[in-house]
Image (cartoon, rainbow, N blue to C red):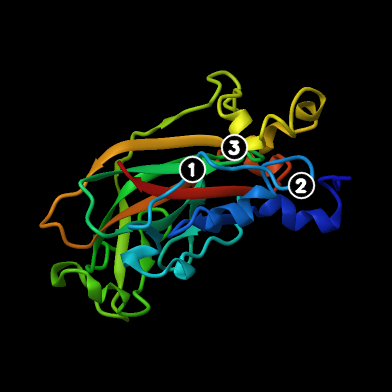
Amino acid sequence: MRQKAGDPEHQTGEKKIQFIIAAVCTMLLVVGIPVYAWFKSQREIARFERIDAPDVLFITAAHAEDSIYLKMGGIDVKANWKNGDGTNAGQMLYIDYVFAVAGEYVPQYTLQMAHTTNNQYTYEIYEAAVTTEEPASNKVEGRDYIIYAPKNDWASKLPDSLKKPAGSTLYYSVGTKVNGAYLNQDNTTKLAEGTYHDLTYEYSKYSSEADSRIEIHSEPLYWQKTGISVTGDKTPFYHEYILRIKWDAEASKEYKDTDIICITAKAD
């Protein structure tokens, strides 16, 4: 039974949403283990096979670092951005996370995202603009840019022109929006409209009456952008992106639950 919004133990739940990002590297099983248990209504293992990735591409943290450095913690929808002097810069309406598609050279690839819809949030992906120069004094961290410091020299496999030494400070901001499209979103409800339902839940096990017990917000939405070109001399590469999670000013009045996001890439 869910707690009521006014219960003390529920206060943290109203303020925060935890996101788990599944980084697929060499096997679909890496995504499958944390995701299977969510995209179903019973405790049996269900199939989740629509989002996949080849061995040559990886989802990484910023600067092509190991995905363990991709931190996605709780989000406080009542928080405010802060100016450099600590004064209020307005209510936060989004939060940004940097990730990268990295790996061996491929001519082009498809970027994919799947997520549940327990919360009324919008998920957008942008190309990341990065610089080592500190932003102007009128820019606000979190609103206008985010900071990332490379943790190690994992990127030593990359061309020298792409490397940044461990300990350096990188400033990221959103660039061009990646105009992908949802494959199974109902235009009216903004929820999943049934496409790929049988692939997600395995029709032979979850059909008729069993289907009716699947919570509608646990039906994942599938988004993708195909034909992303890779330029260069066929050497290892990485493309950096920003995942922006948005909400409106009234989001704090709605019940908050947990959502899961999966991001993968595959060669076309």
User: Residue 156: percent from the left, percent from the top?
Assistant: 24, 76
Determine crowd level at label 2: few under 14, some 14-19, many 20+ residues with C-alpha closer than 10 A.
few
- Looking at the rendered structure, the secondary structure element under dot 2 is loop
Question: Looking at the image, is mark 2 or mark 1 earlier in the sequence?
Answer: 2
Q: Amino acid at mark 2?
A: Glu
Choose between 146 and 199: the one closer to the eye. 199
Closer mark to the observer between disc 2 and disc 1: 2
Choose between 232 and 241: the one closer to the eye. 232
- Looking at the rendered structure, the secondary structure element under dot 1 is loop
Residue on which the image places disc 3? 220
Q: Residue at x 17, y 62 (%)?
A: 235
Q: Which mark is residue 41?
A: none
Residue on which the image places disc 2? 44
Residue lying at the far right in this picture: please name it. Answer: 1
Determine crowd level at label 3: few under 14, some 14-19, many 20+ residues with C-alpha closer than 10 A.
many
Q: Amino acid at mark 1?
A: Ile
Do residues under tags 3 and 1 come within 8 Å of each other at their CB atoms?
A: no
Q: CA distance from mark 2 to mark 1?
A: 20 Å
Question: Looking at the image, is mark 3 or mark 1 earlier in the sequence?
Answer: 1
Residue lying at the far front in this picture: please name it. Answer: 204
- Looking at the rendered structure, the secondary structure element under dot 3 is loop
Q: Amino acid at mark 3?
A: Pro
Q: Residue at x 16, y 69 (%)?
A: 159
Q: Residue at x 20, y 49 (%)?
A: 230
Residue on which the image places disc 1? 51
User: Residue 134: percent from the left, percent from the top?
Assistant: 26, 68
Q: CA distance from mark 3 to mark 1?
A: 11 Å
User: Residue 164: percent from the left, percent from the top?
Assistant: 23, 74
